[in-house]
Amino acid sequence: MVLPIADSTSLRALLNEHTALAAPELTRIEPDGTLRCLACGHRCRIKEGRHGVCRVRFTRDGELRVPFGYAASIAIDPIEKKPFFHAYPGTDALSFGMLGCDFHCGYCQNWVTSQTLRDDRAVAEPRFVTAEKLVQAALDNGCRVLTSTYNEPLITSEWAVEVFKTGKQAGLVGSYVSNGNGTPEVLEYLRPYVDLYKVDLKAFRDKTYRELGGTLQNTLDTIRRLKELDYWVEIVTLIVPGLNDSVEELTEIADFLTGVSPDIPWHVTAFHPDYQMTDPPRTPVETLLRAYEIGRSAGLRFVYPGNLPGAVGECENTHCPDCREILIERHGFFVVRNSMRGSCCGACGATVPGVWPENSPSSSVGTGIPRPAGV
């Protein structure tokens, strides 16, 4: 599926002028001379003057052009909000996003940025910025992690790599918050610069995935490949009443994840009505706790009910997988107490899977509202 490039002085035209040449690793020339984009699982074959499904990668003068040099949203968040619960707990991440997505989820909570080029109601203005300024903002605000998020980062990977490459020189860690519609090529391309990768596993029915704009199998393959490439992976399933909340489907998700690795943290989070999906009710706490029990029964060692802080008891805490001591006590996105010793349980000494710095903050405080980054 390809779309014509707009020729007006619109946002699309503006973005088309702020691009870079696609990475050679993410481009393939077909026998007839057309270009194949390898940035996401759609693998669009893009003829001259056309866009791919994402609407931000396009061909011009025989080149595949990609978004570069701007951010549509920049904020500083607790890393737990991404959510990463087993990586640098209690620290902040500078989050940045561009525009566009290769999916069109009707309940997208970042639709203002992700659906800008599809929906006239989604209005987000780009802020043109250098990688150096983003990294400096992260350093000035004491962040340890850079996160590409808010839109689908796979389709803007060249810009993320530029930012992460600069950040890596300053000791910062790169992370992705993604729908997981990847390719082997893009995951190999990202690996030197991205250590943490969160995937939204939205459902376990291919029909649901096709309605959202992708395929289930491609997301499952991406999760397996991420583990093979030794990324630190955490999975989120937003539980939407009537869409993916049956015991059968949640069990299938939990069984799949356990088969990949029982050490993958699974975040089962509460839906709230948003964007085009306003009919389903908010996810009740009982559903989250049922998903927690399903995950634990399937063999997952770390399951976290989310988006209902304080309503799920001790389930939002990290427990030692051996002695069950509470190692990281949380309230929502914030660490109340951290008693880990490096990567080990402070009580019994067992190793806890994750990316743990030697000196983590013992607690974190804040409001949960994103802070401007001062770029």
Image: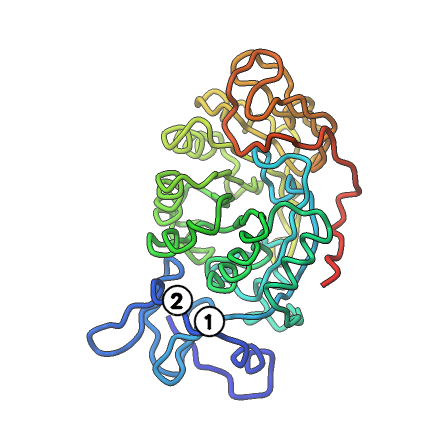
Q: Quadrant of the N terminus?
A: bottom left
Tell me if 102 is positioned left or right of 358 in this view.
left
Residue lying farthest to the front in this orientation: 169
Measured from the top left, where is residue 105 in percent x and y? 53, 56
Residue 78 sits in quarter? top right
Q: Which mark is residue 66?
A: 1
Please name which of the two marks, 1 or 2, marks the residue nearer to the observer: 2
Q: Assess whether mark 2 and mark 1 are in contact (beta carbons under 8 angstroms).
A: yes
Q: Is residue 101 above or below residue 226?
A: below
In terms of depth relative to the viewer, which is nearer, 335 or 162?
162
Q: Residues within 10 Å of mark 2 (few under 14, many from 20)?
A: some
Q: Earlier in the sequence, mark 1 or mark 2?
A: 2
Tell me if 115 is positioned left or right of 367 in this view.
left
Tell me if 92 is positioned left or right of 176 in this view.
right
Residue drawn where x is 62% and y is 66% of the image: 71
| Amino acid type of the residue tagged 2 in the rendering | Ala
Which residue has dot 2 on it?
23
| Amino acid type of the residue tagged 1 in the rendering | Val
Residue 347 sits in quarter? top right
Q: How is this picture coloured?
A: rainbow
Q: Is residue 17 above or below residue 38?
A: below
Q: CA distance from mark 1 to mark 2?
A: 9 Å
Residue drawn where x is 53% and y is 26% of the image: 302
Residue lying farthest to the bottom in this orientation: 8
Residue lying farthest to the left in this orientation: 31
Measured from the top left, where is residue 125 in percent x and y? 67, 72
Measured from the top left, where is residue 314 in percent x and y? 67, 22
Q: Residues within 10 Å of mark 1 (few under 14, many from 20)?
A: many
Q: Secondary structure at mark 1?
A: strand
